[in-house]
Image (tube, grey):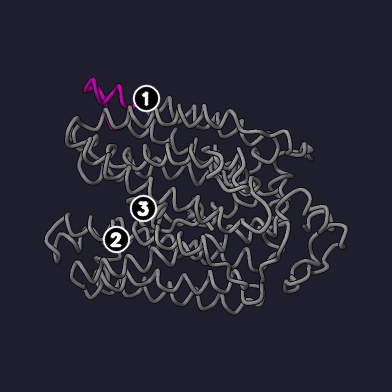
Amino acid sequence: MIRAHIPGWAGRNYLLLTAAAIITNVGTHGALIAAAFAVIQSGGDGGDVGLVAMARTLPLVFFLLIGGAVADRVPRHRVMVAANALNCVSQALFAVLVLTGRAELWHMMVLTALCGTGQAFFNPAAEGMLLSSVDGEQVSRAFALFRMALSGAGIGGAALGGAMVAAVGPGWVLAVDAAAFALAGALRAFLDVRQVADRSPGGGLLADLRDGWREVIGRPWLWSIVAQFSIVVALVGAAESVYGPLVARDELGGARPWGIALAAFGVGTLGGALLMARWKPRRLLLVGTLGVFPIALPSAALAVPLDVWGLSAAMFVSGVAIEIFGVSWMTTLHQEIPEEKLSRVSAYDWFGSTAMLPLSTALAGPAESLMGRDTALWGSATLIVLVTGLVLLVPDVRNMTRRTGTGTGTVAGTVTKRVAGAGAPDPGTAPDPGAGAVPADAVPAETISARTGSADAEGAVRRHG
């Protein structure tokens, strides 16, 4: 009876991946709040909170490329389960130390770094697994519903986590997060990989990384958007983790208005995902890139600054816009990148999109001192618009079209594309100017998010899911 209400394209793997992602998103968004309060509860200040946040981000950036190559060499579901196990153990130890009152700053930094390391291996494997779990005409709807589920789980997790921190303290919230990773890992252990073709180990890890680099650099639409988001994510991360709370404190009356604005962003992502579940734009990347322009609105609203309702409206619109981009990006990756290379390409995507985030948040304070907060925010909004406009100059971004039928992200689609001939454009797509520089067997590809609401841009610019 229940199965009758599940669409035919939602197979076992898609359902398991979605359920597991909802569970971990609820736990993780609560844990982000709990970790900050755990630092404060132990006697730390704002600088200590920043150090713990940095300890999570740095290994995430450092190990992403290795994680992508590993996920294309061994079964992805094993990488995902192992990463979940690492996250479960690190969060459980974090919880025990907090609950027993023994947590010191270095403990929290080490355990948070382990959690970031697990995410570095998990993210490329998870994206590759998700992109290969659906096929056919409904891929956009599948990705939109997946992202909508993540948005709802993130909003609920943040609300539940905040309430639990206030009621029972941060240690129990971290314990719930550890249990969530354990349950999600158990679900992912049941993924059906019988239909996934065996992957050749290739010439080694470095060879796989070089192969992934050739896949990225040979596609102007891919590397240009990754470069664009390295700047966009950095700017949004600084605005939302540093400037937003300061503006709320100084101009809007405190934390409550900022919480309302963040909630409006979450509602916007739900609305955007619902829109993309029904809308199938033909020019995928053109529509997606146009959706990046409104991401500049929150920085501009903070620079004015608008009142809480004006800021919330800007956040809502940016939430809708990033989902338009995110679903278009995931659909394009599914269509253009062969299944056996999805994880290593995803790793370069994640790496490029997050590499500048630690630097931008570290420099946000000095930038405010040097040029003033309003100038820094207006500069962020202007730069987002500028780099997005530059991406529209890339012909493939303007001309990439949706293909009907089986996407080339599947094994069958990869075979079809290779038989068609190396470097030959598929029907309905613009020729790839970089294809001629790529070997024939390498020519077959967002978050979000890229990626991806939280204190950093992992959720604010939610490219992947």
Percent coordinates x, y for residue 187 in the rendering? 53, 30
Q: Is residue 51 visible?
A: no
Camera-side residue: 85 or 58?
Answer: 85
Q: Main secondary structure of the magenta part?
A: helix
Q: Magenta segment, which residues?
A: 93-106
Q: Please, what secondary structure does the residue beneath circle 2 have?
A: helix
Q: Amino acid at mark 3?
A: Gly
Mark 2, Cα crowd under 10 Å, few <14 / some 14-19 / many 20+, is many
Percent coordinates x, y for residue 305 in the rendering? 21, 72
Q: Amino acid at mark 1?
A: Ala
Alpha carbon separation for disc pair 1 and 3 = 23 Å
Mark 3, Cα crowd under 10 Å, few <14 / some 14-19 / many 20+, is many
The residue identified by callout 2 is 264
Q: Residue at (63%, 61%) from the top-left corner?
A: 332
The residue identified by callout 1 is 92
Compared to residue 325, the image places residue 95 above or below, namely: above
Q: Amino acid at mark 2?
A: Ala
Q: Residue at (28%, 42%) from the top-left corner?
A: 33
Alpha carbon separation for disc pair 2 and 1 = 32 Å
Left or right of 222 in this view: 101: left
Alpha carbon separation for disc pair 3 and 2 = 10 Å
The residue identified by callout 3 is 453
* Residue 18 falls within the magenta-colored stretch: no
Left or right of 211 in this view: 384: left
Q: Please, what secondary structure does the residue beneath circle 1 have?
A: helix
Left or right of 420 in this view: 274: left
* Residue 99 falls within the magenta-colored stretch: yes
Pointer 2 or 1: first along the chain: 1
Percent coordinates x, y for residue 82 in the rendering? 55, 29
Disc 1 vs disc 3: which is toward the camera? Answer: 3
